[in-house]
Image (spheres, grey):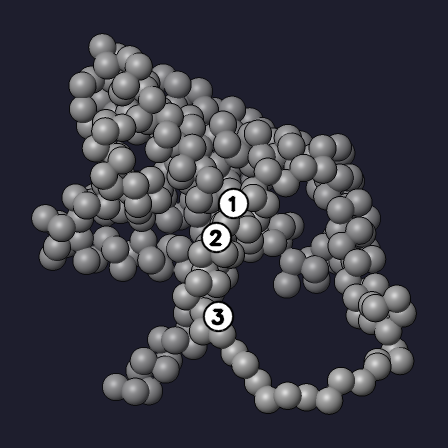
Amino acid sequence: MTSLSQDIKQKLSNLNVLEKIIAINVVVFLLGLFLKSVMGWLELPSSFSEFITKPWTIITYAFLHYDFLHLLFNMLWLYFLGRMFLNLFGPKMALNIYFLGAISGGVLFMLGYTLFPSLFGSYSRLLGASAAVRALLIFLCAHMPNQDIRFFTFNLKLWYVGAAIVVLDVIGLFGANSGGNLAHLGGALLGYVYAKQLLKGHDIGKGFERFMDSIVSIFKPSKKGPLKTVHKNKSKVGGYTKSDFKEFNNQKKIDVILDKISKSGYDSLTSEEKEFLFKAGK
């Protein structure tokens, strides 16, 4: 039993952050098969007055699926988007976009039911990771619109895929799942704004990232080691080591390559730039 738990821990530790989110979604889905009556506490209500009593639902709804196909398609999207995203950007940014996309989708969902009850209805509940996944998808489409992706036997520009998804969500506003499609558009809007601001040099997720880091730090035990003798490190220049300078230079090179992709597409990169980007993604 111990070896099994250790094996599971090792496999989980090898997953990237978005694959870990997939694992959490699967676990919650399996729990829901036996504890469906309890899972209602994770659903996001369309009423602001009810949401105030259950504020955690603005996040938890994005990990809740009752239908297997709903879970399957969301997780397949997340898996393939995650592989593309994490080759270019860091895991913290992936989490920022995922969670902010879920929040944006949830807020727009509640606003729609509050402001336009004749269109969306008087009351509903939201669940599923679609808004968060849309945020990642539209972020990539807006950040590198001319990137080619293989679709069966021909290539498509990435922005074509994003535009088609958004058009389907707009049409879906007048269907049976109008509230869900409204949340999708909220996630898509967040992804688009995030990408456009990042291209201008502004990471709008930094404030959320600092907030989450402060929350996590509360639950981390403080580690106080024994007193150590402090000595000067002669290998440092101005307080920085050679590895610090190397890391800074590598990041600047990555920024230049990403800017080139956003302007001219991935195919415009040289073989050396592609190799460097691939190694950096690892």
Between disc 3 and disc 1, the foreground one is 1
Amino acid found under the numbered disc labelled 3: Asn
Point 83% across, 68% down: residue: 239
Q: Nearer the viewer, residue 114 or 188?
A: 114
Q: Check the image and report above or below for 131 versus 277.
A: above
Mark 2 sits on what residue? 212
**Amino acid type of the residue that numbered disc 1 sits on in the rendered structure:** Phe
Count residues near mark 1 (Cα–Cα under 10 Å), then give few for <14, some for 14-19, many for 20+: some
Q: Residue 168: give x, y in percent of width and height.
A: 39, 22
Residue sitting at 41 percent across and 66 percent down?
A: 219
Compared across the picture, whether 113 is left or right of 10 comes to left
**Residue 117 seen in render:** yes
224 is higher (above) or lower (below) than 203: below
Is the Cβ of the residue at disc 1 closer than 8 Å to that at disc 2?
yes
Locate residue 40 relative to residue 257 in the image: left or right: left
| Helix, strand or loop under label 2 | helix
Whichever of labels 2 and 3 marks the residue nearer the N terminus, that label is: 3
Quadrant in the picture for residue 205: top right
Q: Earlier in the sequence, mark 3 or mark 1?
A: 3
Question: x%, y% of residue 282?
Answer: 64, 63
Query: In the figure, 139 relative to 110: above or below?
Result: below
Please, what is the three-letter code of the amino acid marked with disc 2?
Met
| Residue at screen point 52% across, 78% down | 223
Residue at 25% x, 55% y: name it.
28
Residue matched to label 1: 208
The label shown at residue 84 is none
